Each structure stands twice: as C-alpha cells, then as structure tokens.
Image: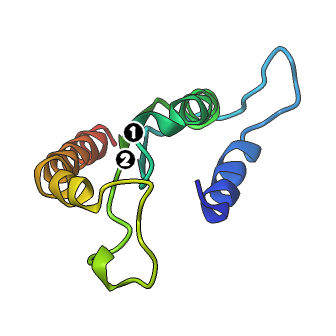
C-alpha cells in the first residue's frame, strides 16, 4: 500500500474516531467501501495486512469488501531492461495478464457497480 493510500486511510478513520470506549465510532451514516489492490507480488502476499485494513474501514467508515489482483506486470516489455529478471518468469506474468487479469478487472467493475447501486 502506498503512502498516499495510508494518508487517505488515516483521514477516513480519524474523522470518525471518538476515543470513547463505549462508542468508539461517531459515523452516523456508514459508507460502503471497495478496496482494490494490485501488486506484482502473489495474491496472498498481503492478505493479513488487507484484513486489518478491511476490519478498521468496516468499523469506522462502512462495510468493506476487498479485491486483490496480484502477480501483475511491472513493465510492458521485460526484455528492454538492462538487468535480467530472475526472481520470476516474465512469460508467466504475461500469460497471467492475458488470462486472469481481464477476469479480475471485470470482477472489480461488477463490485464497483454493486457498490454504486447501494449508494
């Protein structure tokens, strides 16, 4: 997660935080949240971190759904770099980008449409 995301996340949470143990949240109108994360790491690389974000957003902002698209491309052409990419297979990344990524993008569109329909 980027520093920009973290700043937004903190602002979303802080405005509803009361510091009151009996009523920790003062949000009168929960707003549904869809947290979409792309990463060139595998899908499972951030599940614990995202679960924490999801729980906190659900508690202070509104019901939160998470979608992760992992193992994404970093470059359009890995062959045009000055160093070898040996930690992963560029061919596998290209294959996944062509076969799995379009499905994940469609799922994101559907989840976003469902979220907008709730609002």
Front-lying residue, 85 or 113: 85
What residue is pinned by disc 1?
43
Front-lying residue, 77 or 68: 77
Instruction: From the viewer's perspective, tell me whether residue 19 is left or right of residue 23.
Output: right
Quarter holding residue 3:
bottom right
Instruction: From the viewer's perspective, tell me whether residue 51 is left or right of residue 34.
Output: right
Residue 117 showing in the rendered view: yes
Instruction: From the viewer's perspective, tell me whether residue 10 is left or right of residue 21.
Output: left
Farthest-out residue, left: 99
The coloring applied to the image is rainbow
Q: Position of residue 19 (x, y in %)?
A: 88, 30
Above or below, 90 relative to 24: below
Identify the mark at residue 96; answer none if there is no mark. none
Front-lying residue, 87 or 64: 87
What residue is pinned by disc 2?
70
- Answer whether labels 2 and 1 touch (C-beta < 8 Å): yes
Residue 30 showing in the rendered view: no
State the separation of the CA atoms marked 2 and 1.
4 Å
x 86%, y 17%: residue = 21
x 34%, y 74%: residue = 75
Residue at disc 2, secondary structure: loop
Looking at the image, tell me whether mark 2 or mark 1 is earlier in sequence order. Answer: 1
Q: Position of residue 101 (x, y in %)?
A: 20, 52
Q: Position of residue 37 (x, y in %)?
A: 43, 50
Q: Residues within 10 Å of mark 1 (few under 14, many from 20)?
A: some
x 62%, y 30%: residue = 52
Quadrant for the C terminus in the image: top left
Q: Position of residue 11 (x, y in %)?
A: 71, 54
């Amino acid at each position: 997660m980027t520093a920009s995301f973290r700043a937004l996340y903190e602002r979303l949470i802080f405005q509803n935080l009361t510091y009151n143990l009996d009523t920790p949240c003062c949000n009168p109108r929960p707003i549904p949240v869809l947290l979409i994360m792309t990463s060139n790491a595998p899908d499972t690389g951030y599940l614990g971190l995202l679960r924490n974000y999801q729980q906190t957003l659900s508690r202070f902002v509104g019901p939160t759904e998470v979608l992760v698209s992992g193992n994404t491309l970093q470059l359009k052409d890995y062959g045009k770099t000055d160093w070898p990419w040996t930690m992963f297979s560029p061919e596998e990344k290209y294959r996944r980008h062509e076969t799995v990524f379009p499905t994940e993008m469609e799922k994101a569109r559907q989840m976003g449409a469902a979220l907008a329909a709730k609002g």
